[in-house]
Amino acid sequence: MEPRVEPLTDSKCALPAAFTSLSPSALIWQDVLAQAMTGELLAAMNYTSLADICDDPAEVADALEHAQGERGHAAAFAAEGRRIGVSVTNNVDARHWKRLRQAFLRCITERDFIACLIVQEIMLESFAVASYARVGKVAPGSLGKTFAAIAAEEEDHIEHAMEILRAERALDEQRFDDKVHQLHLEVMTTLAEMLARDCSHGHCEVCHGSCVKPALPDVRLSAAELRGASLHQYLKTLDKLGLPGEVTLTWVAQLPV
Amino acid sequence: MGRSTAGLIDFALIGHQESWRAAADVLAVLRGPERTPLPDDEIRDILPWLPPRAVCHVDIESLGGARARGLYIDSFIAPDRLADAYIRDNIARVRGAAAYAIKAGAKMVSLGGFSSILIEGNFDQLPQRHDTVFTTGNTLTVGFIVQGIRKMCAIEGRDLRRSTLLIVGATGDLGSGCARCLARDVRRVLLTARNLERLRRLAAELEAAGVEVEMATDLQQFSSEADVVICAASLASSSLLLGRIAPEAIICDAGYPKNLAPGAETPRAKVFFGGLGQVMGGLTFTPDFHGVLNRHPFPDVVHGCLLEGMALALERRFEPFSQGRGFITPERVEEMETIAARHGIYLAPLYNANGPLEETVESGCGKLCFASGHD
């Protein structure tokens, strides 16, 4: 099947004639941006789906506003690509991203608003906030500022969702924690595989050429660092929700490598 | 383990793994036997990112039937990040672990190993809550170091009163506590540490009590050899003591991590790990971390600093018994040892990096024989 590509990529943005002479770091940023843009577009699709199951018009508006915000982030990443002379593509049907989308859609099918928030706001956004913040620290100029600014915006999303999720957990802690664990097994396992040191299961279908991970140290990043920072953010977010730290430690320790 | 623990926790033990091997074993238990253990490089990647949190429940029972329930909280300080360059990050980790203990409702918190060293002069940096108290646990550690020295001297047929005692790291809480407990029982005391002003203060205090004291910031400056040594601060190698210790010196490695071993340069030295106690009642970990969190050749052996918190919890004395630096006195040590003994917590059998030192006594050697083969 042909990968589905969200039409966010600017088709008018022809590759610069001197593409082949671009610095090696530009090609690394191209793949980093492609992953980030794909994640943002997936988030936009998730929020749009979430609007479909909301009964309250205010919640519908909120979800659609979030979707629009995520599209804005994707557009910002595309613009950063143009600024450094690379075309940033996306592939929301790439192997890992597709699994993440399917996990979210199962929650939609079950009309489980809380599960949707857990997947998007706790798991996917933890990953986004942590990895964007790391990229923001090392990426040069405008590119770094954009990643840092979007990391901060995504963190605000999480805070908003936390209030709803804390209230839900207060109703039945055990049931809530069991739900988080079930979602963790699917979503965090996929994220852990995405962030594994090597793509041992094959090409991720987002990077342009070979896997970008081995080249990340050239721009002062590493897959290990991005994974570590993401897991740290995830554990701290679960702490804030009130889940027992000793339990979530075991969950994380059991993730695949 | 899993639901809220507030109100059920008497004590919390804050620690960290002293080697990558130990860290790997902890993660292997958490992963469970059905999953392949994490490769070493993965562990080095992941561990520094783990926020402080509880790893297991710890239940202790005294010989008299008293029970206390606690948590072991790992600060996840990486084994290769104990140097000064990481001090801010490491203090932040201990603070995080302390906050976790408070949130869990622990009434008494013991600071284990390097956590105690980091915080002994920085108690104001710990989060505060009126119903949670902190102890470095150093008083009981000093008690076990001193007991260990006396035991080794007895086994080796040495007269402590004729000995020259060298204390490395003398101005720290452990070093100064050991000096106060042993100074009047030896012929002469040599004190070494990095801070000259603190050395002068301690030397003056001991001299005022009639003790013959020599002090130096450099071991090589001492005019005489020591035959009993307490390393209250970690030494990179026992060879650093060369030239300043007698060939058959008794050396107590009381530093953290413990890294002295009978080496090629000091083959006849009698090295033992000091400051360890053994629980004679009952000690259980849930999940089962026996032999993983307490990696010693004898059962239910735990660092004195952690045992102090457990003993106080069994005694229902939730008070900050050991805080600050330089306040450990022989009277306080005796009080703490009495509490510990009341609950069946005693000096652990002696051992070093080569293994148990007391096994051969039991097997009829008659005199303490070292695993290295020297006696």
Image (cartoon, grey):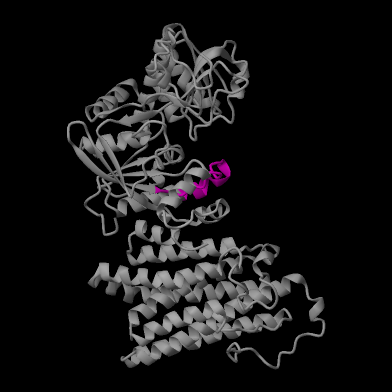
Quadrant in the picture for the N terminus of chain A: bottom right
Q: Quadrant of residue B119?
A: top left
Number of numbered labels in the structure image: 0
Residue B134 spot, x, y in % from top left: 33, 41
A226 left or right of B4 in image = right
Q: Quadrant of residue A135?
A: bottom right
As drawn, which residue projects farthest toward the left? B65
In this rendering, is residue B287 above or below A244? above
Looking at this view, is A126 or B152 the one in front?
A: B152
Residue visible at 28% across and 27% down?
Answer: B336
Please state the extent of the stretch shown in magenta in the rendering. B74-92
| In the rendered image, the vertical position of residue A220 relative to residue B353, given as above or below | below
Q: Residue B55: image x %, image y %? A: 37, 51
In terms of depth relative to the viewer, which is nearer, A226 or A159?
Answer: A226
Quick check: is A75 in the magenta stretch? Answer: no
Q: Would you say residue B127 is visible in this rendering? A: no
Q: Does the magenta run of residues contain B91?
A: yes
User: For this view, does A74 lie left or right of residue B17?
Assistant: right
Q: Is residue A202 above or below residue A252?
A: below
Residue A87 lies in quadrant: bottom right
Q: Position of residue B284 (x, y in %)?
A: 29, 42
- x, y (%) of residue B360? 42, 18
The answer to whether residue A171 is left or right of residue B23 is left
Give B160 or A141, whichever is nearer the viewer: B160
Q: Is residue A133 visible from the viewing direction of this image?
A: yes
